[in-house]
Image (spheres, rainbow, N blue to C red):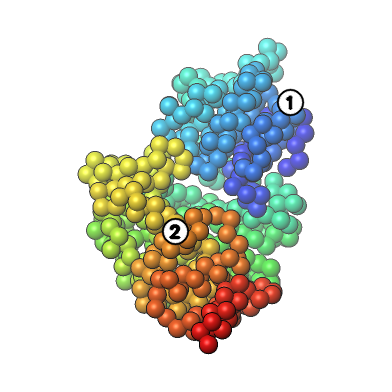
């Protein structure tokens, strides 16, 4: 939303411009009469904290609400520190997953005036009413009514604990996506909140269950967005396919509105794919559906340790079915560094997954999100985490720091090479029948050779593959070069690649 001079400013620092904050829009939707005094202003982390603070202060707010997440906590802390130094009279309210648990020692909590832990859809409005009426000695009768809400002991120092109403009493935020959002950004939507599962690495482990929004009300909102031109919908439901009838109703809604621009992202439970859902999925064309499947680990011992319920055989069968019988883009997640997992068992699971050929494998390093119960394994499995965001695992009893570093680089190079889709033919030669083991050898070589994990051009990656093949594996040079050239041309790159010049020079020297 375009900012204006406002008493209340809602803001956050997004990971990138393409992401639009649905959380801020929920707060705005439930502000009622305070909406006329409120603006939304979003930033990305490429801006310096001082520049963000300057833009915020230009709005001249009395109250600022910051959404704090693992990816923006350090940046946001710097912004808040600057604002408090320059304009200490401004009231700062923080909320979001990163400050909902274990917040007492956080610098941003010390700087802020108030914190709303957990959901704050209506709580933010109530707190703003309280703050504004304290500022206004001539409070209206309506404001006094809002003050009555604070007769209960819910404001404990600077922490405002509030019991949010049932979902059907919330005002939905989707009308507050702007035309710019609809035309240029991913729109985050949710048909349900929470998760019934208790996977200990996830904040959803703290949820009691999954709660649905009224499906007819939700689909009416989706129709409103669609009619305005929205075509890129990212569902943030943790378990889209938990209630199959609801899933089918959503899929049928979009099947009736198929066009060449429609794109839907769902996070699905990997071992739950009944026939009725399969039938609906097969009716979507190429480029329309993306499924994110959180496999995380195929190790039954590890799954049991972290309270993860997953039928591995059904997961493998469903992945195989999706890859061979649907047009959906399959994005599968694995986590390295879970308690009880060693390199060998992780490699076995990675290879199982790779052999099913999902379009992407997202290899994540375990993070100790604030509040998650995975911390209970710290003593037994000697878990060591970074003390600052993103709180990545540094070592376990089975995995030392140096191995964590190697696999972190593996994950980065895998993203650049395997998940990019630019090296399909070359990877078949490189990975053969031991995907994890061979790519780990190759990623070790890239790092030793280049010393870089970032700012590597696509052209340079082709050269690295050529030289890495020669160094790491005994293979025919012409076979490697033919695969690389085809991938190079399919990527639309022009000119003669450096690796081909090197190959020709080597060939000429051998004559």
- The residue labelled by disc 1 is 60
Give the image quarter of residue 499.
Answer: bottom right
Q: Residue at x 50, y 77 (%)?
A: 426
Q: Is residue 104 visible?
A: yes
Q: Residue at x 39, y 43 (%)?
A: 368
Instruction: Indicate the secondary structure of the residue bearing disc 2.
Output: helix
Q: Is residue 209 visible?
A: no
* Residue 246 as seen in the image, left or right of residue 301: right
Instruction: Indicate the secondary structure of the residue bearing disc 1.
Output: loop
Residue 437 x %, y %: 35, 68
> How far apart are the two marked residues, 2 and 1, measured between alpha carbons?
51 Å
Q: Residue at x 58, y 34 (%)?
A: 76
Of the pair 293 and 455, the residue shown nearer to us: 455
Q: Is the residue 116 above or below the residue 134 in the image?
A: below
Q: Residue at x 33, y 65 (%)?
A: 347
Q: Which mark is residue 448?
A: 2
């Amino acid at each position: 939303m375009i900012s204006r001079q406002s008493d209340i400013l809602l803001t956050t620092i997004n990971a990138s411009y393409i992401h639009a904050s649905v959380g801020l829009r929920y707060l705005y939707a439930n502000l009622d009469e305070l909406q006329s005094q409120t603006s939304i202003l979003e930033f990305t982390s490429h801006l310096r904290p001082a520049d963000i603070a300057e833009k915020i202060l230009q709005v001249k707010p009395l109250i600022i609400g910051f959404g704090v997440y693992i990816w923006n906590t350090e940046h946001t802390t710097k912004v808040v520190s600057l604002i408090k130094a320059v304009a200490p009279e401004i009231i700062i309210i923080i909320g979001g997953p990163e400050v909902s648990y274990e917040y007492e020692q956080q610098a941003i909590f010390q700087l802020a005036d108030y914190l709303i832990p957990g959901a704050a859809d209506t709580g933010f409005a109530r707190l703003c009413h309280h703050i504004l009426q304290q500022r206004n000695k001539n409070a209206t009768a309506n404001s006094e009514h809002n003050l009555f809400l604070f007769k209960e002991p819910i404001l404990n120092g600077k922490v405002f604990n509030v019991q949010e109403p049932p979902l059907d009493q919330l005002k939905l935020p989707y009308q507050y996506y702007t035309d710019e959002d609809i035309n240029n950004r991913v729109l985050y939507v949710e048909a349900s909140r929470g998760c019934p599962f208790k996977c200990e690495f996830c904040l959803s482990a703290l949820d009691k269950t999954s709660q649905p929004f009224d499906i007819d009300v939700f689909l009416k909102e989706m129709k409103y967005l669609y009619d305005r031109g929205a075509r890129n919908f990212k569902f943030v439901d943790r378990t889209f396919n938990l209630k199959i009838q609801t899933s089918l109703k959503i899929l049928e809604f979009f099947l009736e509105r198929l066009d060449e621009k429609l794109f839907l992202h769902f996070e699905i439970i990997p071992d739950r794919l009944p026939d009725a859902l399969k039938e609906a999925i097969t009716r979507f064309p190429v480029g329309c559906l993306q499924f994110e499947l959180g496999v995380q680990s195929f190790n039954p011992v590890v799954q049991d340790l972290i309270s993860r319920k997953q039928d591995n055989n059904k997961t493998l069968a469903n992945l195989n079915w999706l890859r061979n019988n649907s047009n959906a883009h399959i994005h599968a997640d694995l986590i390295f560094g879970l308690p009880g997992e060693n390199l060998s068992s992780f490699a076995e699971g990675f290879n199982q997954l790779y052999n099913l050929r999902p379009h992407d494998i997202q290899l994540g390093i375990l993070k100790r999100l604030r509040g998650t119960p995975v911390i209970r394994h710290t003593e037994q499995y000697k878990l060591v985490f970074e003390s600052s965001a993103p709180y990545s695992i540094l070592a376990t009893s089975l995995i030392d720091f140096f191995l964590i570093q190697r696999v972190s680089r593996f994950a980065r190079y895998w993203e650049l090479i395997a998940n990019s889709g630019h090296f399909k033919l070359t990877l078949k030669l490189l990975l053969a029948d031991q995907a994890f083991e061979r790519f780990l050898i190759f990623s070790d070589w890239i790092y030793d050779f280049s010393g870089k994990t970032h700012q590597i051009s696509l052209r340079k990656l082709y050269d690295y593959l050529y030289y890495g093949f020669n160094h790491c594996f005994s293979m025919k040079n012409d076979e490697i070069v033919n695969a690389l050239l085809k991938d190079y041309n399919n990527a639309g790159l022009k000119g003669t690649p450096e690796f081909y010049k090197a190959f020709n020079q080597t060939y000429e020297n051998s004559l």
